[in-house]
Amino acid sequence: MTNTFEPLDSGTVPRFAGLPTFMRLPVAEPSQVDIAIIGVPFDLGTTNRAGTRHGPRELRNQSSLMRRVHHVTGLSPYDRARVADCGDVIIDPFDLMRSLDIIAAHYEGVRAAGALPLTAGGDHLISLPILRGLAKDGPVGLIQFDAHSDTYDTFFNGSRYTHGTPFRRAIEEGLVDPKRFVQIGLRGAISNASNYDYARDMGVRIIFIEEFMARGIEDVMAEARAIVGAAPTYVTFDIDGIDPSQAPGTGTPEIGGFSTREAQAMVRRLDGLDIIGADLVEVAPPFDPSGLTALTGATIMFELLCVLAGVVAKKGAR
Amino acid sequence: MTNTFEPLDSGTVPRFAGLPTFMRLPVAEPSQVDIAIIGVPFDLGTTNRAGTRHGPRELRNQSSLMRRVHHVTGLSPYDRARVADCGDVIIDPFDLMRSLDIIAAHYEGVRAAGALPLTAGGDHLISLPILRGLAKDGPVGLIQFDAHSDTYDTFFNGSRYTHGTPFRRAIEEGLVDPKRFVQIGLRGAISNASNYDYARDMGVRIIFIEEFMARGIEDVMAEARAIVGAAPTYVTFDIDGIDPSQAPGTGTPEIGGFSTREAQAMVRRLDGLDIIGADLVEVAPPFDPSGLTALTGATIMFELLCVLAGVVAKKGAR
Amino acid sequence: MTNTFEPLDSGTVPRFAGLPTFMRLPVAEPSQVDIAIIGVPFDLGTTNRAGTRHGPRELRNQSSLMRRVHHVTGLSPYDRARVADCGDVIIDPFDLMRSLDIIAAHYEGVRAAGALPLTAGGDHLISLPILRGLAKDGPVGLIQFDAHSDTYDTFFNGSRYTHGTPFRRAIEEGLVDPKRFVQIGLRGAISNASNYDYARDMGVRIIFIEEFMARGIEDVMAEARAIVGAAPTYVTFDIDGIDPSQAPGTGTPEIGGFSTREAQAMVRRLDGLDIIGADLVEVAPPFDPSGLTALTGATIMFELLCVLAGVVAKKGAR
Amino acid sequence: MTNTFEPLDSGTVPRFAGLPTFMRLPVAEPSQVDIAIIGVPFDLGTTNRAGTRHGPRELRNQSSLMRRVHHVTGLSPYDRARVADCGDVIIDPFDLMRSLDIIAAHYEGVRAAGALPLTAGGDHLISLPILRGLAKDGPVGLIQFDAHSDTYDTFFNGSRYTHGTPFRRAIEEGLVDPKRFVQIGLRGAISNASNYDYARDMGVRIIFIEEFMARGIEDVMAEARAIVGAAPTYVTFDIDGIDPSQAPGTGTPEIGGFSTREAQAMVRRLDGLDIIGADLVEVAPPFDPSGLTALTGATIMFELLCVLAGVVAKKGAR
Amino acid sequence: MTNTFEPLDSGTVPRFAGLPTFMRLPVAEPSQVDIAIIGVPFDLGTTNRAGTRHGPRELRNQSSLMRRVHHVTGLSPYDRARVADCGDVIIDPFDLMRSLDIIAAHYEGVRAAGALPLTAGGDHLISLPILRGLAKDGPVGLIQFDAHSDTYDTFFNGSRYTHGTPFRRAIEEGLVDPKRFVQIGLRGAISNASNYDYARDMGVRIIFIEEFMARGIEDVMAEARAIVGAAPTYVTFDIDGIDPSQAPGTGTPEIGGFSTREAQAMVRRLDGLDIIGADLVEVAPPFDPSGLTALTGATIMFELLCVLAGVVAKKGAR
Amino acid sequence: MTNTFEPLDSGTVPRFAGLPTFMRLPVAEPSQVDIAIIGVPFDLGTTNRAGTRHGPRELRNQSSLMRRVHHVTGLSPYDRARVADCGDVIIDPFDLMRSLDIIAAHYEGVRAAGALPLTAGGDHLISLPILRGLAKDGPVGLIQFDAHSDTYDTFFNGSRYTHGTPFRRAIEEGLVDPKRFVQIGLRGAISNASNYDYARDMGVRIIFIEEFMARGIEDVMAEARAIVGAAPTYVTFDIDGIDPSQAPGTGTPEIGGFSTREAQAMVRRLDGLDIIGADLVEVAPPFDPSGLTALTGATIMFELLCVLAGVVAKKGAR
């Protein structure tokens, strides 16, 4: 294993110096690495407060505070896998449908290059084209940390592609197996009593925050692991799953969410699953003046990176 | 049940569009509705940092993010009661005593119109004239969520009407039955060791945050319900009861408060009581640049609204 | 002249009380008034930093500080014309082209109702559908205060409808007479040396900020008045024409702009022209934490309102 | 001349160290000094956005950036007069009228002690009790830098003591000679066309910002000096006279104001007048997150201090 | 016991009035008091984001919200000990090593004067010279609340004195007994897997946040008390031990920290130990626009003060 | 002339996408380009409020808004010279003197590579080592835009290397010819009346802001050009020369500064001089929450870049 793909050493190069790449990593192509960190600066699917188009940049900025070795496992993802900042997908800010195609094609390329993608959004609609790019061998499992189900049908005169609808489309398109799909942390009032019907009818397992509080992390994550099983699984983490005191900078905040301690513990329990990619979405810097949301997001990305590095280590790096 | 009094549909009218009425509801008179949401932009009772005069406006603004149906009960308050934004009480910013009279008269009118009031403050002194307007049939019970007791006698050369004194006056005036009065969440240093003596001597039950942490939500709320019993009860929620990380924009923040998850769970356990009105006070927008405090306040107002709608449903709408 | 359409009296109702309508005016239909103040919460034309969808709300909020009588003329627009807040145009946040049609139809209705529209944007693309709604009797004159020409052809793979292109489309569609079109305050680097060629070739008069500084307000405005003459003329004011120290909350700030003193003086010199409508665009509240941009915008709207009231007074109110 | 009353040396004690007294001066009693810098943390006269009660503290905080010697004159006020931080007047936040009496008595004491007061407000109503304390030998002249006239009669049901009325009261009470009273920088819409009538009828000279722009600093200040002449004169500087881009943190901002360069130049031209005291009012820190308003205010206070030191030097220090 | 050293009474002097000394206490010399509250505005040891030099000032500012009597014990520290604001240590912002000597000498003087020091930092490196000044009778015990171990060896070309190294130096210098040293709350990725080796090899007990969550406050604090035992012990509280949602304003935030409720409970469990001094460090106001971090810090300082007052009461005040 | 070194096209790649290099340029080595844009994240010379170590990153971030072609000249610097982002100088945050050596060596290398450096600071002390690296052929001329002279001798116990002393050292070391040295915009109180004596005695021409206001841009710049003449000249632009309303984020703000319009006009008048390098210093992002200071700084850097490109064009690119 080479260590060309190491973060800058913060004892040699101060954290405030240099270009803010993800985790202070080198810039490279997906074909050069085992794990490709990718930005998708897209917020055309947002129904209310836009701004996640600026997410990747600020996540990169705050990720300068990340370090190398996980303090619980004592392992460094950079010892287990080659990791790099693979840049942003260049979307078209005036064409939602074309942007979805661009994203899907990009991730198809990442998959073809053999890298596992770790994505910084962007609004939650981006998970749909990412799944289109990755789920080429049949429906995958999905673990979603979120305040919202994002399985609505349409908004505003029949718009089918918004950040409230990606997972309905993903099920309809055969990208996700609804029986292997679990949503954790949902909460907040809904527009209609029937809003969860589709997901439930399809077999998606919804774990509301109230159930989560009652059962605890271990129990919930054991069930989540059982639901997705050993088959290929994607992980999507909407920052609004976390409480807005710890992640205020998002378009649709809901009070009463996960704490970051809970979030970190849950992500760590993904270890050993066959994760084919992960994303961290809905960080909206214009509503995050302190940068705390992006710091939280960057740290969750580091936790996801450690899980992905475990997948690489298990399968053997290329 | 008519549904004239419905919030704007966020799938048709974007949340950022239109006048920011409470919960995006129509404007109406108390006589037209079962539940009247009312603003009281008053902060003349504030001892240190003023600003709650701007509370109703910002609570309205953030309430645009609220939806229709409670995700735990599956019920919509708008299906159970007619609800509207009934405007602000027009106080006199240069005459505290006259303003108290204006507020009291206003709520006497709301009561006469047969509507249950849900109020957005304003500082905590407003609960006194609200109670003067509502408690016409004898002392009522009171459930107070708060960091402070607000049962001091006087401040500054004998001022008897401040946001630190309303509930002492309310007991003295026979508006509140101290034996049916419970305060939950109190904490923080006090000016004198005797500060809680009056409340305790009168029989008020004080549950400090430490006791709350030790016993848990279920146990504390069971006791609170027992204290107020089946008789008419008012509910007052001071936003500073919630931890300042989740509600920083308030005049007298105290660290170590409720989480919003705890607050939501407690409010939900008010269901079935004979609530005659409720208020959410002490949101101070000048100290809330991110809007998080107003978002938290608006969400707590939605929870209180659901409880009040349950009262209406039980008694039968007019 | 009735004075039903008066702002709330700030000596009776405090400025912080009540719903934040434009200028604290009543809500009404265009058919009831001489001047209709309208919000267009639309930012789908924005190339970089979105957020002007929240402009109308925050302009309403800050307009609570406006008063009745212009201190230079001693005249009140409310004595000269009936004015009301006529609400927002309900756009479709997922369909740019449909939204343009909705806006155009709305302003056609305002025109048919006989009211002069004063619009709060929204990004600058909204001027195009507004002109489509108003310029029914042939091309109109146009006075544009702005940092940018907004006469580009396309962006991103041929997008023809962005906030950088409205006035090229307006000329192409015969809505604006380029010979009666003047742009004041342009500045800042451009993408290509040819960016101004179209406008210049068509006869648009561009007055850069450097020329403005050299000649002064009186001289420049005399020329502007001569260019548009006595025929019907529309006025569009992009807040980024003003220096970002006085209007930071905008998507494409350019340093070195007008001062507000200069802006106010220029707008006052529009008096006597045949203005058929005016807009104030590009206020982006997510980038305006202090509210200063919206305050500046609301005050410019008051100045424009006084000019429009002069038009009404001259023609005779309905 | 002793130099006990010197600011801390910023080349020895860093500016960030130590208690933030005004100008980093020692704390002393008025009887010990020639010039007493005093805070009046009072905002009970505010009609809309309160917060100037926090003004003195933040003005002290930002005044740590001030230095010793004026760069234009080469003179240090501390070489010409003994100057100290004489603390705050302890007002009663629940009794406006009592507070006015406390302030008046305090300044009567300062006058009796023989010190010239330089005051940090507080809202503009404080100038009234200050004048009551100082104008014991008959009406004084008054130079007012301001966006507003503050000569209204009443607000809200007849309130005569607000920050919009102090100078009407001061004229009525014989504290200020209206013929020796000049107001500079007024602007912004007014509530009624008659708002300036009282001032004009009494002979107050109002110089609007438009006249100021047309004539320039030298001409205007020459007239102002002629108006007050050689007799005792008070100077009041409302921070809202300065443009809100340079002083956003104030309760009633008006765009289009003085620049700080103009403000500094005007204050310098007060040199040689018989100034009996000065105040800087209306800094509202809750609306000044960046601290720029307080920095501007502290710098204007330094300019006023230099003028007052000139008065001491001319009369001879005690 | 005199009560000369009492905070200002907030029912008489408003909290917004007067100089912001620590806890609104009088200014005095260490020799006059039992407990000396001292600021050390030093951040030369900071590796990334500086700013703690401004910590003491803002901690003083927010401490105006503190009151007299602890609500759990019913005791006031001011009834048990003489306490004062003893000013700042005047460091040299251009000489780290000289500043360390200045601080050490200062605390040697505090110790000689017989006062227990309660310090407001400053970055964490200040604990080293404080220990040099206090640990004159042999190594002391140490309880550290923190996200980081601060026992690194060097940074940047061998710098041995940074805020990441103080406790390694303190062990090497014989100031702290590593067997009586416990660190609570550590978390976050580390630069190298060996980062904790030195501390562990020396016998320091590290309690990560995960262990803390699993065992709870009571169990952890019982162990901590056992580790330090009855011998003299110093307490250092790094504000970054607390979750960044409650203490965002710090140079090296780590998500997933203590809640303030937990922090308060832990500090209270220090009661009865032989505490020889305590500090609260790493509050960085430039990254704390809301002031919440300083409020949290000031409240933790009040909790520490109550513990120190218990030590004084036990030993008998001087 | 190749155009490999072009900024990303904002009509193809949205401004919010991609790594924030200076001006969205490629990253390259100085030897590959004619003009090297370099960051120096250093603030160890700061006497009060640190934070300019974060300047280069935020200047890069805001420079994404820059475009290609200067609107006054119609010329693009990228058509006249090869320009790239040449990264940051890696300083040692714990060793001021070593950092000065690192910087000097770095610029010696840039000079040897034949590129003209355009630097983003960092505090003003960095100009000293830059001049050490560049002024190898004898003293150069110097044009300084600034609020402060920065020609003090020492601070704090004799510190000779601070951001208040670089140009005294530069004269002493023979790097700058004081007879060819002009300072424009100085203002603000000074610590001692003698502060300007050294500069004046050495022949430095100081143009205070008052003289600048009286004479105007043309006259002042004509004199400045005459002072430096045709010989090699360095340009240093301290952002605090600009008014704090337009550049609040700096460590030592002084009200009453240049406007950005004036600053731009002055920089443009440097055209044709033999400029050997330029810097823009003292942008402190922790005090610039809105980003306006960095936007202003990035735009001034673009103006300086255009001037440097003129030098390259005149001499012929390599």
Image: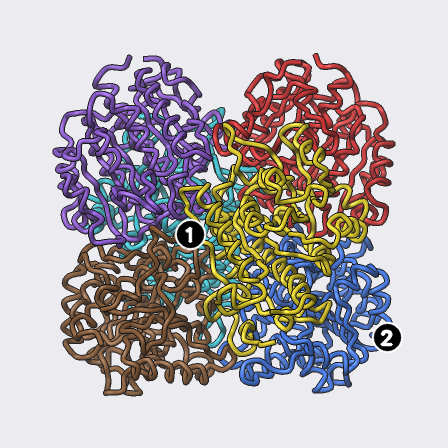
Chain colours: A red, B blue, C cyan, D brown, E yellow, F purple
**Left or right of B215 in this view: E153:** left
Residue sitting at x 60%, y 82%: B154
Q: Residue extending furthest front? A: E137
Q: Quadrant of residue D204?
A: bottom left
Q: Which one is in front, D44 or A272?
A: A272
Residue that mark 1 sits on: C293
Dot 1 crowding, Cα within 10 Å, few <14, some 14–19, many 20+: many
Q: Quadrant of residue B41?
A: bottom right
Dot 2 crowding, Cα within 10 Å, few <14, some 14–19, many 20+: few
* Residue D181 visible (yes or no): no
Q: Does dot 1 land on a helix, a strand or a loop?
A: helix
Which numbered circle lies on residue B109? none
Q: Amino acid at mark 2?
A: Ala
* Residue E214 visible (yes or no): yes
Residue sitting at x 68%, y 17%: A111
Q: Which one is in front, F159 or D24?
A: F159
Which numbered circle lies on residue B230? 2
| F317 to E131, vertically: above or below | above
In which quadrant is the N terminus of chain E drawn?
A: bottom right
Q: Does dot 2 land on a helix, a strand or a loop?
A: loop
| C68 to B69, vertically: above or below | below
x, y (%) of residue B145? Answer: 72, 67
Q: Are marks 1 and 2 on the same chain?
A: no
Q: Chain of mark 1?
A: C
